[in-house]
Structure formats: C-alpha cells, structure tokens
C-alpha cells in the first residue's frame, strides 16, 4: 500500500475524511436510538475544533458526504448489552 506524502499537521483531506468516517462508523455500529445523541455530540466538538484550528469548510463537506453516502455502509449495530458494558465501566460509547 502506498500513501501519499503529507504534512504531519492537519490538512484539508484529514478534516474531510475524519468527518465523513465518523458518520459512517456511527451509522454502521451504533443502535439507531444512539445515533442522534452521538452525532450531535461529535458535531458540536468537531465544529468547535474547526473554528479554532481551521478546516471548517472541509469538515462541513465531509459531514455532508458522510451523511449522503452513509447507506453504502452495511449496518451491524452493536447489541444493547455491548453498549451497557463500557457504560457501566465509565466509558459510554457516545463520546
């Protein structure tokens, strides 16, 4: 596998793909009832970071891309028991 050489700092492609992939992973792995909670929390965090560190346009582009193409990801939501276990240990799967 060959990855193109990039700067170690955050770049436009990073912002776009990180936002897109977060939506894909949430759609694929979380129970439907947790999706709005998880995505609203991460949208708030991601947009706050983008305002401070740049990349707002690419972040929004990635979110739009992730949301419109989320159906390409096959859903395999985790069971509620799986959600409960890390929550009981103090690490809920929301953030």
Image (tube, grey):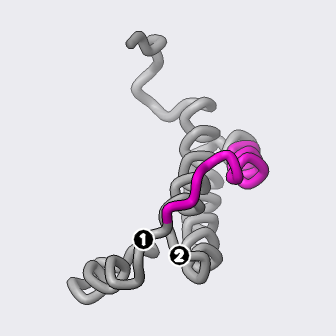
Spatial CA distance of label 1 from label 2 is: 6 Å
Residue 56 location, x and y as percent? 70, 47
Image position of 17 with respect to 90: above or below:
above
User: Label 2's element?
Assistant: loop
Earlier sequence position, callout 1 versus callout 2 = 2
Quadrant holding the C terminus:
bottom left
Label drawn at residue 45: none
Residue 84 in which image quadrant = bottom left
Image position of 14 with respect to 95: above or below:
above
Residue 27 in magenta stretch:
no
**Which of 42/2 is in front?**
2
Residue at 63% of width from left, 73% of height from top? 40
Residue 79 in which image quadrant = bottom left
Q: Which residues are magenta?
A: 60-76
Residue at 60% of width from left, 30% of height from top? 13
The answer to whether marks 1 and 2 mark residues whose Cβ atoms lie closer than 8 Å is yes
Residue 66 in magenta stretch:
yes
**Which of 5/94 is in front?**
94
Question: What type of secondary structure mainly makes up the magenta span?
Answer: helix
Q: Is residue 64 rendered to the left or right of residue 47? A: right
User: Label 1's element?
Assistant: loop
**Which of 40/53 is in front?**
40
Q: Which residue reaches farthest bottom?
A: 88
Label drawn at residue 31: 2
Residue 48 location, x and y as percent? 60, 62
Residue at 44% of width from left, 15% of height from top? 3
Whether residue 26 is visible here, answered yes or no, is yes
Residue at 61% of width from left, 51% of height from top? 50
Image position of 9 with respect to 64: above or below:
above
Residue 38 location, x and y as percent? 55, 73
Residue 1 location, x and y as percent? 38, 13
Q: Which residue is mark 1?
A: 78
């Amino acid at each position: 596998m060959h990855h193109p050489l990039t700067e170690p700092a955050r770049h436009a492609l990073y912002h776009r793909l990180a936002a897109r992939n977060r939506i894909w992973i949430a759609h694929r792995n979380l129970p439907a009832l947790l999706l709005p909670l998880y995505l609203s929390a991460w949208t708030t965090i991601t947009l706050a970071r983008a305002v401070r560190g740049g990349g707002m346009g690419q972040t929004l582009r990635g979110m739009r891309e992730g949301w419109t193409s989320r159906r390409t990801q096959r859903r395999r939501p985790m069971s509620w028991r799986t959600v409960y276990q890390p929550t009981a240990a103090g690490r809920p799967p929301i953030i």
